[in-house]
Amino acid sequence: MNRIRWTRRASKALSLAVVSLLLSACDSIPKDETAGMSVEKLYSEAREEASAGNYERALKLYERLEGRAAGTLLSQQAQLERAYMSFRTGDKAQALAIVERFIKLHPTSPAMDYALYLQGVINFNDNLGIFGSLANQDLSERDQQASRDSYQSFKQLTEQFPRSKYTPDAQVRMRYIVNSLAAYEVHVARYYYRRGAYLAAVNRAQQTLQEFQQAPAAEEALALMVQSYDKLGMTQLRDDANRILRKNFPTSGFIATLPAPATK
């Protein structure tokens, strides 16, 4: 009988302990302070936080808004805002993942022009790998893929949405990318030339001319070709490159440093 009584007491104590633990766990779950907000109010709050520079807080609010407004244009807007907030907080990989998912899921969205623009901006790098310090770096191994990806996003935007308000800025960025990529190729060609890798220098200079004919760096690319062919003893190719340089850049400062091409 005592044993039965003890078992009942133990069972009752255990039940109370379980209930207590459950209540404690409920208390520890963070409350959703936005639970009573309408989607419009939630959007307004997120915009205010973003305007104040509280990007982490805005990011969380946009994430909640995206779920609550699912299937609406407001949800699409929240998704793009999440991508931008991730970008502003330095999480480029997450920002790209969000915007790429948006482009895949909403190809006919009225915000597609902004999505392409944002994708280009995220990949756009003001440095582009050539204006920073080049010390102790093998330029031939530097990756310019992000810049090329950025260019493709801007190109798609300008072709599909020529009247978009984002197109003029995208065009400016495209020109900058082209000039920077061309300058990068010349940096690599010069890198090879200075180290005696003349054939590699020619190849990179030729790549510059093939891809970026109108870029300012084309002038130096031709000069490097003349110098490299001269070192390789390829006089015919040297003179051909020299003539092209003089024809296209008659006032080039490089001309004075190069031998005159043989007359035919």
Image (spheres, grey):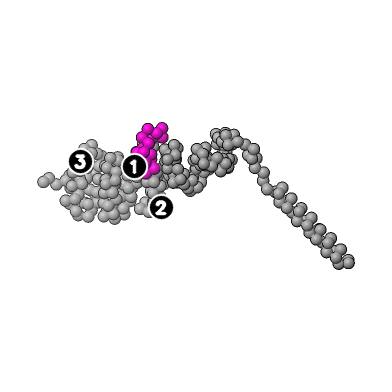
Secondary structure of the residue carrying numbered label 2: loop
Q: Pointer 3: what residue?
A: 246
The amino acid pointed to by label 3 is Arg
The residue range painted magenta reads 152-168
Between the residue at mark 3 and the residue at mark 2, the CA separation in whole angstroms equals 34 Å
Asked if one can make out residue 157 in the rendered structure from this viewpoint, the answer is: yes
Residue 161 magenta: yes
The amino acid pointed to by label 2 is Asn
Image location of residue 167, percent across then percent down: 38, 35
Mark before the other along the chain sequence, 1 or 2 = 2
Q: Pointer 1: what residue?
A: 178
At horizontal 55% and vertical 40% (from top left) the residue drawn is: 69
Between the residue at mark 1 and the residue at mark 2, the CA separation in whole angstroms equals 25 Å
> Height in image: 51 above or below 189?
above
- What quarter of the picture does the N terminus occupy? bottom right
The label number, if any, that marks residue 136 in the structure image = 2
Between the residue at mark 3 and the residue at mark 1, the CA separation in whole angstroms equals 23 Å
At horizontal 44% and vertical 46% (from top left) the residue drawn is: 104
Residue 154 magenta: yes
Mark before the other along the chain sequence, 3 or 2 = 2
